[in-house]
Structure formats: C-alpha cells, structure tokens
Amino acid sequence: MKWEDLADQPCSIARSVAVIGDRWTLMILRDAFLGVRRFEAFQTRLGISRTIITERLNLLVDEGVLAKVPYQDRPVRHEYRLTPKGLDLYPVVMAIVHWGDRHYAGEAGAPLLHRHKACGCDFHPVMTCSECHAPVDAREVETRAGPGAG
Amino acid sequence: MKWEDLADQPCSIARSVAVIGDRWTLMILRDAFLGVRRFEAFQTRLGISRTIITERLNLLVDEGVLAKVPYQDRPVRHEYRLTPKGLDLYPVVMAIVHWGDRHYAGEAGAPLLHRHKACGCDFHPVMTCSECHAPVDAREVETRAGPGAG
DNA sequence: TCACCTAAGTTCAGTTTCTGGACGAACCAT
DNA sequence: ATGGTTCGTCCAGAAACTGAACTTAGGTGA
C-alpha cells in the first residue's frame, strides 16, 4: 500500500491519517491551535524545510482543515486559520498532548497547562460515551462493521 | 529540525509524535486495537514493506507501547500486544476515528461502529473536562506554560 | 535613488527513507 | 525430500526530505 491509497480505504483512521498522519502535519496543527497563522512563523518555530511547510499547508487547505485568508494587499499576504473542520481536530490534539503528558513529562511536570474557561480549572481531557456520559475504557468497547464498511 | 529531535522538545505533542506520529505507526496501532497481534497479520493487512513493519514494531516495543510476548517455542514465535501505556492511546485512536467518521464517511455512513458494553449503545467519543465533566470546545480553553516548560 | 528589509514562496542537488522482491532461519507436516 | 509457516534481513531503485540559494512584490530609511 502507498500513502495515496490510504484515503480510499473503508476505514476512518486511514482516511484521517491520509490527511493529518505525518509528523510535520501534526506539528503544524499543534502550532495552529496555539495561534500560529503565518508561513514564516510555522517555518521558524518548526525549523524544517520551507518546501515541506508549503506542501503541508497546501494539503491542509485543500482538505478544508485550514483556510488561506488574506490579511493585507500590496503585496497580498495570507494567513492560515483553522476552519470548523480543523477545530474539530481539537480532541485529537488534546488526546495526543495528554498521552505525552502522562508518559513523557519529566520530573517537573507538563510543559503546557490547559484551563477550561467554563469552570476555571486546569484540566485534562477525558473521553466519555456520547450516550451514557461515562468515561470509556478500551476494554469496554466492542467494534463491528458499520453501514459504510467495504 | 529532524525527526529524532522531536523527542527532546519541551512539548508533549512533539514527544508523542516522535513515537506514534507517522502514517504506518498509526495504522499499526489501529490494527493492534482491532486485535491484530502477529507480524504476518500486520504485514498482510497493511500491504507495506516488511522492513517498515519490523522497524515500527521495534520502535513501539522499545517505547513500551507494545510488548513482544512469546506464544510458542520451537521455533520461538512472538506476538505484539498493547501494554497499559499502549491502551492509553485509545482516546487518540478514537478521536481520529471520530474525525474521519464526521468528515470522510460516505453516504452509507461510518465503516465501523463502536458499542459501549457498559450501556449497550453505539457511541462516539466526547472529550470532557476532567474537573467539571462538561464537553470541551477548542475556544473554551486557555493554554499557558506549565512547570515542565523549557 | 539605492541599498536593504519582509513575507511567502520556488528550485535544485544531495541525503535519507521507503518500497518491492528475493532470500534466510528454524521448525512442522506429509 | 518437498513444501508450508512465521518472522525476519538484505538490497537496488524510487520517493521524500533537507539546506541553501533564488524569486516576487512591495516597504523603509538616508
């Protein structure tokens, strides 16, 4: 299998991974959620090849995860903003952050804290069931083919 | 920046992405959560180079995400099982699945359904606040440097 | 007016990584 | 003896990534 074929698999992970599943794309999304919007800022923060920044930003724009919005004319300059589809990735990003916090934080603790404005507390994300609202554990879930299976 | 440097960043996303953040590793984890345990099964299901399977499985074992457990002697054969650290990735995998279900499912619907045994319902994951238990939206969160910041 | 600066790319040679396919090791079944 | 299974390794060629220079379109200061 090749990368391009991932998008055609009857599997939501494969389809998502085809868009967001490489190292630099995930790092770009992290920065986007931290408020980074400009090409130069992504490039400087990540310190990777401009070619890759261009390519990844274009892919995310093509997929509707980011929108390219002009913020000045003469000369035209654009910034990259998360779309609603992009904002929907927040649980993915937070789940990854939380796993890193649990398993790779040093003695000092987590590099970043997240405060939930609604309640005012520092929090970590908890995955709950949409139906009974209880926290869900991997072993309590049964997976089976759905209507969109191949 | 190079891949190896990601693990040394004062950022939980970078550290996590250094381990799980490439296309094939995420696909291997998907299969692991679906019950796949053997080298041949991973290779056949993914249809990618055996070299990559070997390399990725070894990385995941080194990082304690999978454990290499012998299931027979003469000749010794191993299977790869999710460790508790690996099972902690379930929210990451489910968040990715859910994003794919929302934005890439065809007319037919989701390729896979997930039943929460505790309540018996098909569900999707909801990210909630560990403190007030309310669902969390990206715009309700304020991020700031934590004790482990660089 | 001229030199220099910024932002957002593009181009390209050289390096690293990935692929597909063959091969190897250690055993089992017939 | 021949073929099958499982889990790899090895290698040449293809694809992806890197770093550095270059481009475009305009702005700044002297």
Image: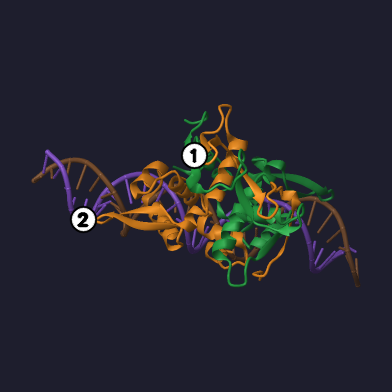
Chain colours: A green, B orange, C purple, D brown
Asked if residue A52 can be seen in this view, the reply is no
Query: Mark 2 belongs to which subunit?
Result: B
Query: Mark 1 belongs to which subunit?
Result: A
Residue at the spot of label 2: B74
Residue B96 vs residue B104, the one in the foreground: B96
Q: Position of residue B35 (x, y in %)?
A: 41, 45
**Residue A5 marker:** 1
- What residue sits 51% from the left and 38% below the top? A11
Asked if residue A5 can be seen in this view, the reply is yes
- What residue sits 55% from the left and 45% below the top? B94
- What residue sits 77% from the left and 45% below the top? A69
* C-alpha separation, residue under disc 1 versus residue under disc 2: 38 Å
User: What residue type is disc 2 on?
Assistant: Arg
When asked about the image quadrant of residue A88, the answer is: top right
Image-based side of D11 in relation to C5, left or right: left
Residue A10 vs residue A67, the one in the foreground: A10
Please, what secondary structure does the residue beneath circle 2 have? loop
When asked about the image quadrant of residue A112, the answer is: bottom right
Quarter of the image for the C terminus of chain B: give it.
bottom right
